[in-house]
Image (cartoon, rainbow, N blue to C red):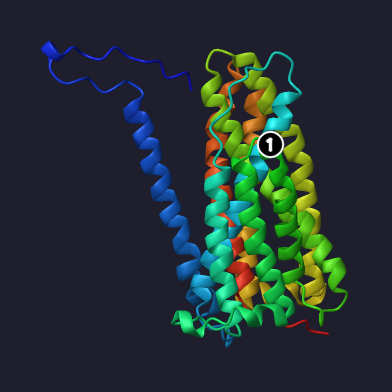
Amino acid sequence: MGLIGPTDAASDEDGPARTPDGERPAIARAVAVLVLVALAALIPLLGPSVALDGTGEAAAPGVGGIGLLRTVLFAALCVPLGELFVHRLAGRLPGAPPDRARPWAPYAAGAGFVAALGLASVVSTGNLVPHSLGAIDVGGLYESRDGKLALVEVNGFAAAGLCALSARPATQIWPLAVVAVAEALRAHPAPELDPLTGSALTFVHVVCAALWVGGLLYVLRTLSLWGEARAAGVALLGLYARVAAVLLALITATGVWSTLRRMPPDTVLDQLTSTAYGRTLLAKVLVVAAVAVLALWARLRLRRAADPLTACSPARAEVVALGVVVAVSGLLTALPVPIRWT
């Protein structure tokens, strides 16, 4: 994780310039990221058929594509919120290097804008996948609650992108918060029993998860730049780990509460195996459990290892597993909500 230093290019007499030592690892990391992103995309695309098999439930048209769009939307929230979060943490460390990893927030806002636009087009056609531009009724979005929320998300990501490119990128926190609120309201329609409670739980759940996922990603990217400033790196990773423990507790509490609101205690075990929503939720719980183990492993290394920064190895695996959680969450929001048995 040391700094990649410049190398002297060969002179014209010696032939073409040599590849810098750090270029191949950088390319390898980029290829690895692309492969992992492609594999994660398969979860919402192929997951519905597996989750629905044998349940007797019918999914909405285009459920795989909708799940993929929601995965992109969630990831687009994680990246900028995590960057803002880590900037705040690093600012609290005395003597921390000024270097920070290049922000991905503008790219995330662009991806979120496209995903939100795609979801809005589905809402405009009555939750049917539009097969032509003529089928999209933009004006109709203003006539329904879901349509208005979809427009809020589109505009929220557009505003976040502009803020990220401005002289004050920290202001993107406000449009991102609006997007999170809109997503929480969308997930709990008015006919639902006590929808405001459900929306509040979802908002806390989404924000905490975004800070956890995006924060860890940006911590690891920042540590790769700090090189010899190992003490500052250990301090940043330790500070993040302490906050992440609180975030995990909030995620667990809100997740359990939300589950019990949709699946009463005496039906949970049955619905976890007999409904598509329950099966996907069970898969998410298992992956989150694996993430918790990796987080604990990283924390133990951070405290007890001779070189505390060896904690970065399980932390990198944790980021990959968290990416799977985001993809499964995108699929979960696209599947039929389980029947509340009474």
Q: Is residue 85 above or below residue 19?
A: below
- Position of residue 189 measured from the top left corner of the image (x, y, whole percent): 77, 77
188 horizontally vs 312: left or right: right
- Position of residue 173 measured from the top left corner of the image (x, y, whole percent): 72, 46
300, 30: nearer the viewer: 30
Query: Residue at the location (62% across, 17% down)?
Result: 97
Mark 1 neighbour density, 10 Å: few (under 14) some (14–19) many (20 or more): few
Q: Is residue 270 visible?
A: no
Residue under numbered circle 1: 168
157, 48: nearer the viewer: 157
Query: Residue at the location (58% across, 53% down)?
Result: 75
Quadrant placement of the C terminus: bottom right
**Mark 1 belongs to which amino acid?**
Arg
Instruction: Locate residue 79: give its quadrant.
Output: top right
Instruction: Locate residue 178: give its quadrant.
Output: bottom right
Query: Residue at the location (59% across, 52% down)?
Result: 76
91, 318: nearer the viewer: 91
Q: How many marks are shown on the rendered structure?
A: 1
Query: Residue at the location (81% across, 83% down)?
Result: 191
Q: Is residue 234 visible?
A: yes
270, 174: nearer the viewer: 174
Mark 1: which secondary structure?
loop
